Image: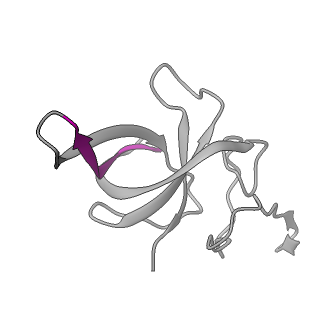
Amino acid sequence: MVSKGKLVKDPGIPNVKIPEKTCDDDNCPYHGSLRVRGIILEGTLIKYRGSKSGVVERQYLYYDSKYKRYERRRSRIHVHIPPCVDVKEGDKVIIGECRPISKSISFVVLSKVT
């Protein structure tokens, strides 16, 4: 798929919209050379830093077999945010696992949940 002279790759993940904007980021799954592999998660973007990075928090239920009930847990995942994906703090996003981009970033934001 070609968008304004730039090749756009489809990462092959269902329910993910390809962004309209283009970017020149090498760590973009749509316009760069970053491959998405492994797990796909959904969470809320709680921090957005200016250097194309942020923090996504996801909540899940954990079954405690001793007390035979569920407890709510959360985990915070550091993510890379490509410039072509238009998200802001508080948005629900879909993230995908990729190769390590830095010491703590191994996930990339794919799209906003509509």
Which residues, given as a range, are shown in magenta? Answer: 52-65
The answer to which of 63 and 13 lies nearer the viewer is 63
Above or below: residue 6 compared with residue 40: below
Tell me: residue 94, above or below residue 16: above
Q: How far across and down, in percent of the image, does residue 51 sit? A: 44, 39
Q: Quadrant of the C terminus?
A: bottom left
Residue 3 x %, y %:
82, 74
Q: Tell whether 67 sits left or right of 10.
A: left
Q: Is residue 56 left or right of residue 31?
A: left
Relative depth, front residue between 92 and 61:
61
Residue 60 in the image: above or below residue 37: below
The residue that appears at 88% across and 72% down in the rendered structure is 2
Please name the residue shown 60% across and 26% down the image: 100
Q: Name, please, the residue furthest toward the top.
A: 103
Count the numbered circles shown.
0
- Residue at left 64%, top 71%? 19
Name the side, left or right, on which 17 lies relative to 78. Answer: right
Most frequent secondary structure within the magenta stretch: strand
Q: Quadrant of residue 67?
A: top left
Q: Is residue 111 above or below residue 37?
A: below
- Toward the viewer: 113 or 62? 62
Q: Quadrant of residue 64?
A: top left
Q: Quadrant of the N terminus?
A: bottom right
Image spot of residue 18 (x, y percent): 68, 71
Q: Is residue 11 magenta?
A: no
* In the displayed structure image, the side of residue 99 where residue 60 appears, left or right: left
